[in-house]
Image (cartoon, rainbow, N blue to C red):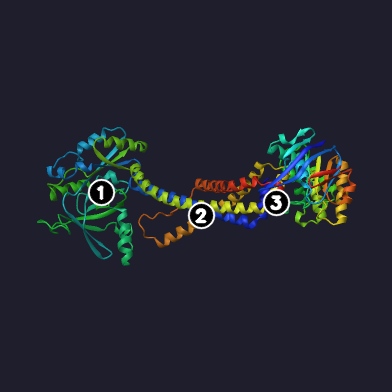
Amino acid sequence: MIVLQEIYKKFSSGKSKTDALIDVNIKIKEGEFVALTGPSGSGKTTLLNIIGGLDSPTKGKVLINDFDLKHMNDDELSSYRNKEIGFIFQEFHLEPFLSVRKNILLPTLFDGHTHDVETYADELLKEVKLVKKSHANANELSGGEKQRTAIARALINKPKIIIADEPTGNLDQETGEAIINLLKNLQKTHNITLIIATHDKEIARLAERTIHIEDGVIKRH
Amino acid sequence: MISIALRSIIAHRSRTLLSILSITIGVASIFLFVSLINGINKASTEATAKENPLNQIIVRPKLDKTGLVSFLTKSEKGKLTDKTIEDIKKINGIKNIYPEIQFGNFASVEVQLVGIGVLTDSMIFGVPYDFIKDEIPNKATWESTEEPYPAILPRKILELYNLSVASPQGLPLVAEKDLIGKEMIFYPRYSTFFASGENSKSDKVMLKIVGFSDKASLLGPTIPIEALNTLNRYYAPSGNNSYTELFVETSDQNKTTQIAQEIENLELSTQYFTKDMKEVQAKISYLSIGLGLISLIIILLSAIAIIGTFLSQIAERRKQLGLLRALGATRNQIKLLIMFEAGFIGLFGSILGIAAGILTSIIFDKYVTVELKNTILLPDTLFSITPEIIIATLGFGICLSIFAAYIPANAASKIDPITALK
């Protein structure tokens, strides 16, 4: 269970201050598929970064299974990001000089894992339909293939939460739909909490619940 | 992690090559300087050991005891006499004492070299057979009581002649074998520089060169001590009857320094290997400091180049490093990744640097052998390359690279993943 209580986030740049998030209160159940919608600059990415442990709120609590993230030091937050969270980015962010397989295995390098990651990587390659491309370098892939690699990478450490920030933003509509369907299927199969930030209403409609945010304020759940 | 580091090195080829080049230059210079100092040290040690074996102490009167007052008063104090030998013999660890005497009047020597007669003022020394037995296997040769008296010359005199006379004047070089058996004329009481009442070439003593030795004095021929005693009685009856030097052989070379100190306690002056080496090494240390400073500048430049290269590489790789942080890499792991990369670059650069150093030393040695072939005491190689130097330089190169990469690695570990991934 993800619980955000009275979250405020302010960004300072010189003398000017921006309120990115104002009194955000959200609860997301385990295994839920939530779409975070809102226009550009509304605070979607900031909210995802706070849930993902990449950023911390100026005020408020982020409880993951009742544990407050503010009690974690930098190394513990790294471990949290590594084990509990799977990130999917709009721009894929793959290592261009590594193969698909090595990109998928990248998060396994940083912390201990209890499962056989090599076998699991093979399973994920099958699930994202990239077995034939497993030895190709990331820079040789199409946009859809890159995002499928990023999805497999997000799943390699068997996280409980997948955070996808505009995962279809750099893809054509057809490929984007395929990616969202793949994510939805994987979310069901692996029983993962999936939070997608999008401004695409069609994608949002596929989610179990939509949270709309505007100017840092939650408008509707 | 190693795999990422290696792939990252390959992916950023131009930066990697630049860093490797910096390390190569730094390591090559250090390697050359260290092996040069080592080579000079080794050559000096060998040269010193040749003149002064490890178990030998040369004993001389103390300078203040042989000064003007001593000369005018004909005082025996401080001179090397039979009593001095007896006193030294009482010290534990003395194996042999060989006295050396000197002709007690003016003397000149004439020798025919490549058809040219050379007449010069000279000193004549006398030593017992045992002192030079290694050079003259046949004892009877040395103990000849008739003219021509056997004489030995120092090896260095040949080098001096070849370098400063034969080479500049285009005369043929002279080898030891060319001079063995050659006769020299020794003119007692005759000086080419100092005129005196009895200065004439009327008296002649014939000498015959029977060998060469590093133990022989550079100042003139060395003949049997008995023969010189006889000549002194004839030509220098009022001369100094004391010994000029005593060559003391110790039974244990490790005790030479200790024994030398005991001899010095008898108010005598000593010269021995360790003492000579201290002086030589003091001179070498100036050279080491000079070369060390040059190396330090080169190392600093290499380090600055590496820091610069890594910093700009990290600026280029902000996205990659930010991604790794987002995926769970800790700050220390990012630091470690950059250090790994620096370590590999250091390893490759050091291997190349050592190879470049070895190649340069070979080329330099070849050049020196050809261009300076007639230089006195020129060793076979100026560089002494040992496995220790290779290992130490390799380690140094890797450490230098890692050390220089520390600041960039630290900067990399502080990259904010959110900003980097924007």
Q: Can residue B106 be seen in the rendering of this structure?
A: yes
Picture residue at 29% right of the left edge, 38% below the top: B96
* Left or right of residue B208, residue B189 in this image: left
Residue at numbered disc 3 = B319
Contact between marks 1 and 3 (CB within 8 A): the answer is: no
Q: Quadrant of residue B14?
A: bottom right
Q: In 3D space, how far apart are the residues under numbered discs 1 and 3 (Cα atoms)?
A: 88 Å
Q: Can residue B3 be seen in the rendering of this structure?
A: no
**What's the amino acid at mark 3?**
Lys
**What's the amino acid at mark 1?**
Trp
Residue at numbered disc 1 = B142
Q: Nearer the viewer, mark 2 or mark 1?
A: 2
Quadrant of the snapshot with the C terminus of chain A: top right
Q: Counting other residues with Cα less than 10 Å from the Cα at mark 1, is it few (<14), some (14-19), or many (20 or more)?
A: many
Depth check: give the residue in front, A214 or A193.
A214
- Label 1: state its secondary structure: helix
Relative height, residue B125 to residue A3 (above, below): below
Q: Chain of mark 2?
A: B
Quadrant of the snapshot with the N terminus of chain A: top right
Q: Quadrant of residue B270?
A: top left
User: Which numbered dot is residue B240?
Assistant: none
